Image: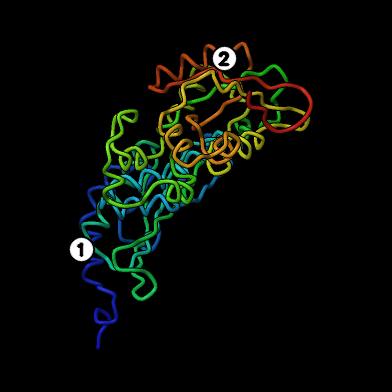
Amino acid sequence: MDYKSAGVDIEAGYQSVALLKDHVKKTMRPEVLGGLGGFSGAFSMDKIKEMEHPVLLSGTDGVGTKIKLAFLMDKHDTVGIDCVAMCVNDVVCAGGEPLFFLDYIACGKNYPKKIAAIVGGVAEGCKQAGAALVGGETAEHPGLMPEEEYDLAGFAVGVVDQKDLITGAQIRPGDALIGIASSGVHSNGFSLIRKVFEMTKESLATYYEELGTTLGEALLTPTRIYVKALKAVRDAGVTIKGCSHITGGGFYENIPRMLPDQTTALIHKDSYPIPPIFGLLQRTGGLGEKMMYNTYNMGLGMVLAVDASDAEKTIDALKEAGEQAYLVGEVTAGGTGVIIE
């Protein structure tokens, strides 16, 4: 009897680490101390000393049941981007710069090439966010999870000078709401998606003219990372008064999180193009409009509140950064929450 016969292959673990080292190296920042393989990730705080009142920010999340599509399609190199995006986008919502990231993979069986593909996606997400991948954990759970399955989660740590925190406290009636386009469904609402669409290899491989791709490719498109986008807005001299990452709960849950009391976000739903995947999802599932906006991002991954006089400058800065951005509404006095009309 040995550990391998019990379901845990230590040698496979060593092989996984060897395969992913090159991915990790591509995410390094000057502040990272030491290399991969230590018991903890070391990150120098010297740069933070330049700030008047540095504030650490953190975000943690997973990929959710979107990961089931990766199993069915046997495509594992993009879900890591989703994992990073779900964490760092929350950090930048508060005005922070993501510094480093750690991932956690739980699997039924360690297949080194599959683990390396997953971590390769994590590393790509970190590169897009400018964050260092300083560590992680891969845990085999034989008997707890099927051998072919895994789950992926992680967390990010960032920093912001206290004076630059985005809190929403300065939002006033008349402020403009700027929407930044999403890359698709991102990583929320997949439990409903898996009920609407048949989850088979054949169904996911079906090509849809309106999507310009297969259903599986459209759904597995990784979550967009907005770190550089928000930096571009700040570098343009715009004060971001409020920021909402449109994740689970859609417009109705997330936009109010940035609003002060006695203000309402008025969103004009025809002010930007809604990606066709949402129309296909709504028609196929017979879903109501309220449910769609209460579950999905409907084409906007981030919504920013800025002074109305800065709206055009904000959109221009975002477009120069490679984003699609739109004036999607305004803040009104009284009430609370969101009105979509």
Residue 94 shows in this picture: no
Residue wearing tag 2: 311
Task: Identify the residue shown where x is 51% and y is 18%.
Answer: 326
- Does residue 85 appear left or right of residue 138 in this picture? right
Residue 286: numbered disc:
none
Mark 2 is on which residue type? Ala
Circle 1 Cα neighbour tier, 10 Å, few/some/many (<14 / 14–19 / ≥20): some
Residue 249 at least partly seen: yes
- Where 334 falls versus 42 (above or below)? above
Above or below: residue 145 compared with residue 325: below
| Residue ID at (37%, 45%) | 132
> In terms of sequence position, does the residue under pointer 2 or pointer 1 come before the other?
1
Q: Nearer the viewer, residue 20 or 204?
A: 204
Furthest residue in direction bottom, as rendered? 1
Q: Is 322 situated above or below 83?
A: above
Could you give the CA–CA distance between mark 2 and mark 1, rounded to whole angstroms?
A: 51 Å
Q: How many marks?
A: 2
Q: Residues within 10 Å of mark 2 (few under 14, many from 20)?
A: some
Please identify the quadrant where the C terminus is shown: top right
Picture coordinates of residue 73 (x, y %)?
A: 27, 50
Residue 111 position within the rendered picture, expressed as x and y whole percent measured from the top left: 23, 63
Q: Which residue is mark 1?
A: 15
Mark 1 belongs to which amino acid?
Answer: Gln
Residue 9: horizontal and vertical position, in percent?
A: 25, 73
Front position in the image: 174 or 300: 300
Image quadrant in which the N terminus is located: bottom left
Q: Which type of secondary structure does the marked residue at label 2 adopt? A: helix
Residue 108's image quarter? bottom left
> Where does the image place residue 26, in percent across and percent down from the top left?
27, 42
Please tell me whether mark 1 sits on a helix, a strand or a loop. Answer: helix
Question: Is 75 in front, or is 154?
Answer: 75
